[in-house]
Amino acid sequence: MAQFTPGEMEVMRILWEHGEMKPAEIQEHFPRPIKNAALRSYLTILVDKGHLTRRGKGKAFYYCAKTKRESTFRSMLGDLVDTFCGGSSEALLCHLLAKEKLSPKELLELQRMAQEESNETDSSERKKS
Amino acid sequence: MAQFTPGEMEVMRILWEHGEMKPAEIQEHFPRPIKNAALRSYLTILVDKGHLTRRGKGKAFYYCAKTKRESTFRSMLGDLVDTFCGGSSEALLCHLLAKEKLSPKELLELQRMAQEESNETDSSERKKS
DNA sequence: TACTATATGTAGAAATATCTGCATATTTCT
DNA sequence: AGAAATATGCAGATATTTCTACATATAGTA
């Protein structure tokens, strides 16, 4: 799905975090110094690719992420799992378990919290019906 | 550290899997049709960047991955965690636990296996001393 | 109105990634 | 030696990413 260049990725990160912004604001949050027009060329490309929307508001244009953070995360995580874990996210889980060195008790507690959170998400999405 | 383009990534994957190969062999394993010379331009760039080594063997040059699969994995996983999990790999673990829906028993078993494997790796690396 | 600050539009330069075509060299086989 | 198959060398075309420079537009204000 998504395949962002490094510069595009920075823009998406900033807009995911802060919501709708105009170029000058994004520029301030950029992790390295960048000229306004250079930044705007990223924005134009991202709009063309359908990852951002743009609307005039007062004097300036405001940009907003259309491609969702979560779906990008899933897509990139999937790519990583395909490349390095033979497509099995259980293998990735295994890798993290080896690295994290949690006690069995801590691990079970983490699992409980994780599944609680995902249930909350599910039920809030179920409101629609 | 590493930051591979899509084409470079394919080459690295193939060499990580198969070891030392010559261009025509890599070409056969490439996931899409690619001309020999196009593939070789990837190889030249990867040698220049220090990710591959090259040595003459018989008529042809053979290429071998110098940048390790594991370190690339760690680096890319780290980037993903920085971008989407606030730098905490525990947050990524949490995400996977929510998705995987393992029973507590299965989870603990997985942890046991994961930590055993990583201990084996540790001790084999310790042979050097 | 004229000045200033802020935005946008646009053309295109520079660097890099991807790919093509063709000439040349080396091995192998007859 | 001569032909066919296999490799390499290299020049450069094409596409994309990243960036620069400058012209123009618009709002607010002295």
Image (cartoon, coloured by chain):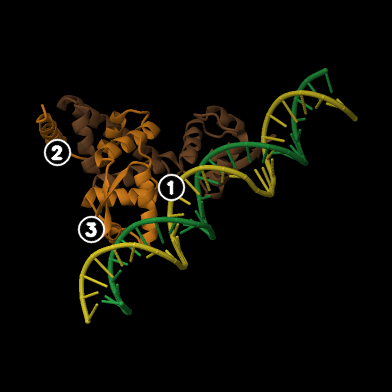
Chain colours: A orange, B brown, C green, D yellow
Image position of C23 with respect to B117: above or below: below
Asked whether B53 or B76 is in front, the reply is B76
**Residue at (30%, 30%) from the top-left corner?**
A89
Asked whether A73 or C22 is in front, the reply is C22
What is the chain identity of the residue bearing mark 1?
A: B
Q: Amino acid at mark 1?
A: Ala
Residue wearing tag 3: A58
Q: Is disc 2 placed on a helix, strand or loop? A: helix
Residue A106: numbered disc: 2
**Residue at (33%, 51%) from the top-left corner?**
A10
Q: Amino acid at mark 2?
A: Glu
**Residue at (26%, 40%) from the top-left corner?**
A68
Q: Please say whether residue B87 is visible from this viewpoint.
A: no
Image position of A46 with respect to A76: above or below: below
Front label number (2 vs 1): 1
Q: Do marks 3 and 2 both belong to one polypeptide chain? A: yes
Residue wearing tag 1: B2
Front label number (3 vs 2): 3
Q: State which quadrant residue B36 falls in.
A: top right
Q: Could you say where residue A41 lies in the image, as x and y percent from the top left?
A: 39, 54
Front label number (1 vs 3): 3
Q: State which quadrant residue B58 falls in.
A: top right
Position of D5 compared to B72: left or right?
A: right
What is the chain identity of the residue bearing mark 2?
A: A
